[in-house]
Image (spheres, helix red, strand yellow):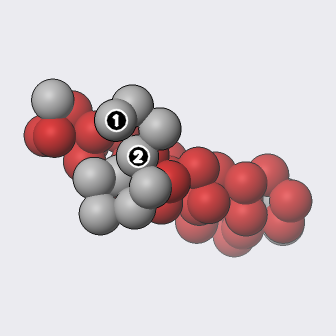
Amino acid sequence: MDTLLWILAVILVVAGIFALFRRQLLWGIVLIIVGLLVGPGGVSIFS
């Protein structure tokens, strides 16, 4: 389960960074924050 959460978190953060590069500031910030919350190192919403 931890591996799945890490993969999901990485995908969300990378998608957020790409959104920032496309000038979608709010969407990029939201994706990065959600990615950090989902990851096992953050405050995981699944535990």
Where does label 2 land, which residue? 44
Image vertical order of residue 35 relative to residue 22, above or below: above
* Residue 11 is at least partly visible in this image: no
Residue pictured at 84% horizontal, 66% vertical: 25
Question: Horizontal and vertical percent for residue 38?
Answer: 44, 46
Quadrant assignment for the C terminus:
top left
Disc number at residue 27? none
Residue pictured at 39% horizontal, 31% vertical: 46
Question: Horizontal and vertical percent for residue 32?
Answer: 59, 60
In the rendered structure, are the residues bearing label 2 and label 1 in contact, judged by CB atoms less than 8 Å apart? Answer: yes
Q: Between 9 and 21, which is closer to the camera in this rendering? A: 9
Q: Amino acid at mark 2?
A: Ser
Question: Horizontal and vertical percent for residue 17?
Answer: 58, 66
Q: Quote the CA–CA distance across marks 2 and 1.
A: 6 Å
Label 1 SS? loop
Q: Within 10 angstroms of label 2, few (less than 14), some, or many (20 or more) residues? A: some
Residue pictured at 16% horizontal, 40% vertical: 2
Where does label 1 land, which residue? 47
Quadrant assignment for the N terminus:
top left
